[in-house]
Amino acid sequence: MTATHTHPAPSARQEWATGLTAFAAVMLFLAGLLTLFRGIMAIAEDDVFVTTPDYVFQFDLTSWGWIHLVLGALAMVVSVGLLKTAVWARVTGVAIAALVIIANFLSMPYYPVWSVVMITISGFIIWALCVVQRGGNLYDLSGERQSR
């Protein structure tokens, strides 16, 4: 006689959690790719960027390009880990998205509209990664774990 093991059907909360992690992975990959391209444009010293005199956080455009290039490459690597649902990737994904927010805020005078768009996308990535608990459940708004 053979024993059959049945797995419990995933709850709606677990399906949402899986969907949010996949959303965060895809968005982090896209944000990383776009940040990578922005870095390449800045390193090539493209005429797309606006130069603002007397900005408090003024760096050389090439320096900003290398910062964005590295952040973009790291974001793309971490997004692959998110698709494999690795816990390290969720923690690192939040950190990378936060660094992308900071880098885009500091480089806002060079490309203002795109910086605001990337800050918004990174905010959604952080939200999607933080709302999912380790076991595949969702947190409610009070921070308590929701029961199944």
Image (tube, rainbow, N blue to C red):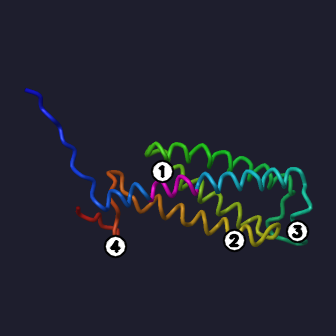
Residue 21 on image: x %, y %: 45, 55
Q: Is mark 2 on a helix, strand or loop?
A: helix
Q: Nearer the viewer, residue 83 or 110?
A: 83
What type is the residue that disc 1 sits on?
Answer: Arg
Q: In the drawing, what numbered circle is on residue 50?
A: 3
Instruction: Tell me the CA gap for discs 1 and 4.
Output: 21 Å
Q: Earlier in the sequence, mark 3 or mark 1?
A: 3
What type is the residue that disc 2 sits on?
Answer: Val
Q: For the point 67% across and 45% down, which residue is it?
A: 73
Q: Which of 97 and 128 is in front in this view?
A: 128
Single out the mark in the foreground, 2 or 4: 2
Residue assigned mark 1: 90
Residue assigned mark 4: 142
Give the side of residue 35 with respect to residue 3, left or right: right
Residue assigned mark 2: 116
Q: What stretch is highlighted in magenta?
A: 20-27
